[in-house]
Amino acid sequence: MTAQFLDSNIILRHLLGDHPEQSPRCTAYLERVERGEIQLRTADTVIFEVVFTLQRQYHQPKARIREAILPLIELPGIILPGKRRLRKAFDLYVDLNLSFADAYHAVLMEQLKLDEIVTFDRGFDRVPGIKRLEP
């Protein structure tokens, strides 16, 4: 089975249901993935774009964003190498009230076995196991 690349606008139209023609088509397409008929590849950056758009443009709460996106990326037909990293990032994003990028970086630091970050961003002070340093 050949995989296709999934872009953020398909996920957004499906989640938002805000376009009378495109939203139902996106939902039907993703239902085919759920049934195992097709496989899709995507990237962490696509998920970043979805999170950013839902939070900034549609003012969705962080917990609702996590609840909407995680089931999609957990589908076996969604090929996304960073699934485990994204799961953890969503938890930090919601539980520690970090930006999604900072949460992702904190998880990446853990995977790289790094415990110090050079930044002025005080949000990292809330992340257990990370020491924030200023230049």
Image (cartoon, grey):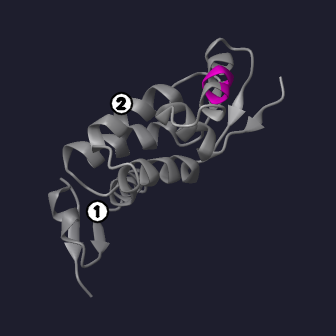
Would you place residue 91 above or below residue 34 in this image? below
Would you place residue 71 above or below residue 92 in this image? above
Residue 126 on image: x %, y %:
15, 57
| Residue 135 shown in magenta | no
Label 1: which secondary element: loop
Residue shown at 16% from the left, 64% from the top? 125
Disc number placed over residue 67 in the picture, else none: 2
Q: Main secondary structure of the magenta part?
A: helix
Would you place residue 110 above or below residue 38 in this image? below
Disc number placed over residue 115 in the picture, else none: 1
Task: Return the residue found at the far top.
Answer: 35
Disc 1 to disc 2, C-alpha distance: 29 Å
Label 2: which secondary element: helix
In what quadrant of the picture does the N terminus appear? top right
Residue 41 on image: x %, y %:
69, 37
Residue 7 on image: x %, y %:
65, 45
Count residues near mark 2 (Cα–Cα under 10 Å), then give few for <14, some for 14-19, many for 20+: few
Q: Quadrant of residue 28?
A: top right
Magenta stretch? Answer: 25-29
Task: Return the residue found at the far right.
Answer: 2
